[in-house]
Image (tube, rainbow, N blue to C red):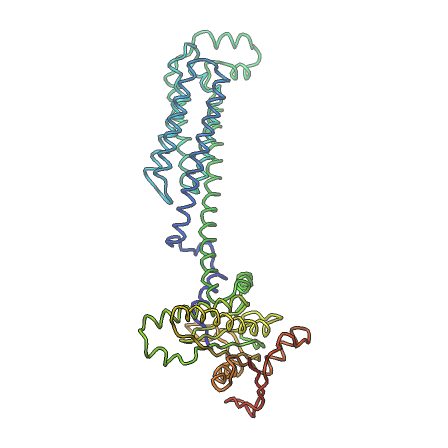
Amino acid sequence: MSQSSADITGLRRLSFTLPDEVELDNKYTQAALERHKREGLELAVRARWIAMALTAVLLVFLNPNWDVLYYHFILLLICANGWLIRRAGRVGQSRTELLLIFVDLLIMTLGMVVPNPFSDDVRPLAMQYRFDNFQYFFIILAAGTLAYSWRTVVAIGTWTAGIWTVGWLVAWWVAKPIPGLTERVNEALAGFPDVAELLDPNSFMIPQRIQQVIVFVMVAVTLGVSMRRLNRLLMTNAGLERERANLSRYFSPNVVDQLSQNDEPLKQVRSEDIAILFVDIVGFTRFAASRDAYEVVEMLRAFHARMETEVFRHHGTLDKYLGDGLMATFGTPVAGERDATNGYQCAMAMLAEMDRWNIQRRRSGLPEIEIGIGLHYGPVVMGDIGANRLEYAVIGTAVNVASRLEALTRQLPKPFALSEEARAQIIAETGGSERVVEGLVEYPDQTIRGLDGPVTVWAC
C-alpha cells in the first residue's frame, strides 16, 4: 500500500536540504524573519536610547559645563533618527532605512569633528581627535546587529569609515595651527621626537586616524559576514521546521525526530514485522447517499481528525486515507519494541473516542457513526518504489489480512477484530502477561480470503 508522496518529498528535503538550497523567497519564512527583524529594531532603538542616556550622563561627568548641552542635543538627534530607522526598517534592502543610517552617522561625525560653538575654550582643531570619540561609532555598529540585517551592518561600517575619513581630512585641510605650541612641545621634549609628535596639540596623528578606520572596517565586515550567516541559518531553520511540520501530518512526533536525525532512513527496501491497522465507517455509502455533500465532507474531516490523532498519540504512521477510513502502521519507518501493543491501544482509543463523539452527535440530533477496525501483525516489505515519482510503500500479505479483518467486523458482533499473530505479539511485548488483552473474545475457524485454511480471530 503506497503512502502519499507528500511525506516522502518532505522527508527527502528534510534529509538533504543544504543552506544554499533554501528558498529565500518563501513567504512564510520571510514573514517570520520580518517579524524577528522588527523585534530586533525595537530592541535596537531601546538599546540606543539607553546608550545615549548613559553617554549624556558620562559627558556631564567629563565636562561639567553648560556647553555640554550642545552634545546632548546631538545625542537627542541620534535618538530621534533611531526612531525613524525603526519605522523604515524591513527585511532586505530598504533605501529609506539606509539613508537614515547615513544621516545617523553624519550627525555623529559632525558632532565629533566640529568644535562646540558654545564653548569658550580655545584649542587647536586637532585636539578634537584626542578625546577618543570614535569609539562611540561602535555603539551604533553593535546596535545594528540587532536588526538581523547584514546589509545594515556593512552599510554602517563602510559609511562610518568614509564619513570619518572625509571629516578628518577636511579638518586637517582647513585647520589653522596655533603658533608656538608645536615649537614649545618640541623644545620641551628635545631628543624624543616620537613623544613630541604624540603630544603635539596641532598634530592630527594621521597614522592613528587610519588605524581607527581600518580596525572599524574589519570589525564591521566580520559582523556583517556573521549576520549574513545568521540570516541564512534562520531561514534554513525556519524551512526545516516547516518541513518537520509537514512530516508530522504523516508521522508521530517521535518518528519525525528519528527521521530528521537519519540522513537516509528510507533508502533500502527491507522486510520487517510491523502492526497494520485499518479503520472504516460502517454503512458510509448509505449515510452519504441521503445527505448533502458538504455535510458528508465535514463529517469525514471530523472523523479523520479524531482517528489520526489517536494514531499519532500511539506512535503510529498514517499510511493513507481511504475515503471513509484510513490505514495506519506501527513500526514504520523504524521498528519499535511495542508496535503491536501500540496498534492495539490505538484501536481501543479509537473506539473510546467514537463513543465520546457519538454522545455529542446524539445531543445534537445527529446519527451515530459506527466503525470497524482490523489489526494484524506480520511481515511486510517496505521502501521506495517507482522510477520518476517515488513513494514509500508498505506491501505484503499482512496488509491484506489487516484490511480483511476490518471487513470481517461486519459479520462479527464486535467492532474490533485482531489476528492471533497480533494477540501473541502483544503478549510477548508485555512480558508474557495477558492482562493487556483481557476482554477479547475468541472466534475460531474464521475464513479470510487469501489465507489457506481457517484462522482464529479475536474481537472486542
Res. 83 image quadrant: top left
Percent coordinates x, y for residue 80 in the rendering: 37, 29
- Compared to residue 161, the image places residue 285 above or below, namely below
Residue 313: x and y in percent read 53, 66
User: Which of 289 and 93 lies nearest the eye of the viewer?
Assistant: 289
User: What residue appears at the point 51 percent right and 68 percent down from the top-left corner?
Assistant: 310
Looking at the image, the residue that sits furthest to the left is: 292
The quadrant in which residue 188 appears is: top right
**In the current view of this chain or complex, which residue is farthest to the right?**
432
Observer-nearest of 184 and 454: 454
Give me the residue at 43% from left, 7% from top.
179
Is residue 19 shown above or below 389? above
Side of 249 where 255 appears, left or right: right
**Please, which residue is most extreme toward the bottom here?**
453
**In the displayed structure, does residue 354 sit left or right of residue 437?**
left
Q: Residue at x 52, y 17 (%)?
A: 198
Indicate whether 419 appears above or below 75: below
- Give the residue drawn at x 34%, y 38%: 88
Query: Which image quarter is the C terminus in?
Result: bottom right
Q: Nearer the viewer, residue 378 or 147?
A: 378
The picture places residue 15, in percent across and down from the top left corner, at 50, 62
The number of numbered badges drawn on the structure is: 0
